[in-house]
Image (cartoon, rainbow, N blue to C red):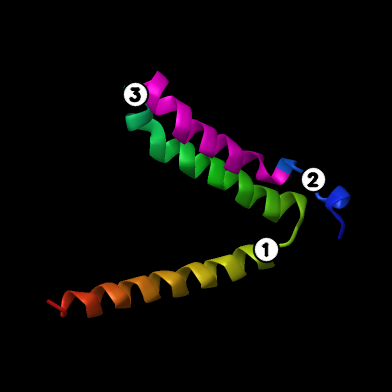
Amino acid sequence: MSGADISIWPATPFFLLLASIAVLPLVKKHWWERFYPLVSVGLGLVTVMYYLFVLRKPSPLVESGFEYVSFIALIGSLYVIAGGIH
């Protein structure tokens, strides 16, 4: 797959989230503090729906989920181990 074959549209929710994190706390602070979880979950759902309904390939989501769970387990174990070191 060459660079010309890759579309920018699947990355749009990520770019919107980055722009929102950079701009909205400065422009609409109280709105952003209240609705940040909804904005982030909504943009994440856009990406999930793209993989499920447009590409019809749930395997990247499942693989990413397994990697995420293993990463959280690693971080949690390091936190527990480091807690015993004084």
Crowding at dot 1, Cα within 10 Å, few <14 / some 14-19 / many 20+, comes out as: some
Sequence-wise, the earlier of marks 1 and 3 is 3
The answer to whether residue 37 is left or right of residue 52 is left
The answer to whether mark 2 and mark 1 are in CB contact below 8 A is no
- Residue 35 sits above or below residue 51 on the image: above
Residue, disc 1: 58
Between the residue at mark 1 and the residue at mark 3, the CA separation in whole angstroms equals 36 Å
- Residue 16 sits above or below residue 86 on the image: above
Residue, disc 2: 7
The answer to whether residue 75 is left or right of residue 24 is left
Question: Residue 9: image x %, image y %?
Answer: 73, 41
Q: Amino acid at mark 2?
A: Ser
Crowding at dot 2, Cα within 10 Å, few <14 / some 14-19 / many 20+, comes out as: few
Image: magenta residue range: 10-28
* Residue ranking furthest to the top: 27
Question: Residue 73: image x %, image y %?
Answer: 38, 75
Q: Residue 29 — which label?
A: 3
Q: Is residue 20 magenta?
A: yes
